[in-house]
Amino acid sequence: MELCKARPDLKVYGYSKSWLEFVKLDASGYQWPSNYLTNASSGSRHERTGLANAFLSLPVVRGDFLAVKVDKAHINKRAYQDKTKAGSKEYRRDVLAKLKQIQTKAFACPGNCGNCLPQGRHACGSKDFAGVAIGIGIH
């Protein structure tokens, strides 16, 4: 985090299942870097606990990053790797349908970081996607 603070010219983001560590650091009064966001990765042991709400409410947390079950045909075609792959649109449609069962605001990751939004922006690192569940198919 200190390296992020030292490089305000960079936009940095990550993923974490270690929610307790973030909550503890925040409770200590830590000042988060303004150029950092994290995504709440599904599969955390804290998912269905009171800690989940505490983590998701931190100013440094963009929102959920969820892995959902999709048709194996998508995985076999490797449609999850890039939006230019055959079957990618159908794969993302499948992911989005599964996400919408969990949360109304949802976005399907096309797989290759840097090509999901115009101008090389990343949904996972964008404050514009705060509160939006971003999902991928389990592969």
Image (tube, rainbow, N blue to C red):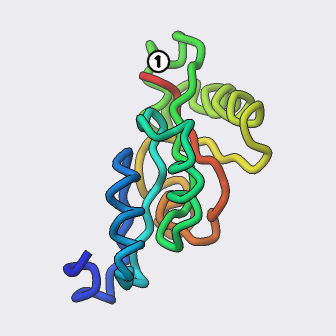
**101 lies left or right of 81:** right
Compared to residue 66, the image places residue 9 above or below, namely: below
Where residue 139 appears, as percent x and y from the top left, is: 42, 22
Q: Quadrant of residue 54?
A: bottom right
Residue that carries the numbered disc 1 in the rendered image: 75
Compared to residue 33, the image places residue 56 above or below, namely: above
* Residue sitting at x 58%, y 47%: 134
* Residue sitting at x 22%, y 81%: 2
Residue closest to the eye, 53 or 94: 53
Where residue 65 appears, as percent x and y from the top left, is: 52, 45
Label 1: state its secondary structure: helix
For mark 1, does the 10 Å Cα neighbourhood hold few (<14), some (14 to 19), or many (20 or more) residues?
some
Compared to residue 21, the image places residue 136 above or below, namely: above
Where residue 13 appears, as percent x and y from the top left, is: 38, 64
* Residue sitting at x 57%, y 27%: 68
* Residue sitting at x 59%, y 54%: 53
Residue closest to the eye, 131 or 126: 131
**55 lies left or right of 17:** right
Where residue 80 appears, as percent x and y from the top left, is: 48, 31
Q: Quadrant of the N terminus?
A: bottom left
Q: Quadrant of residue 9?
A: bottom left
* Residue type at tag 1: Ile
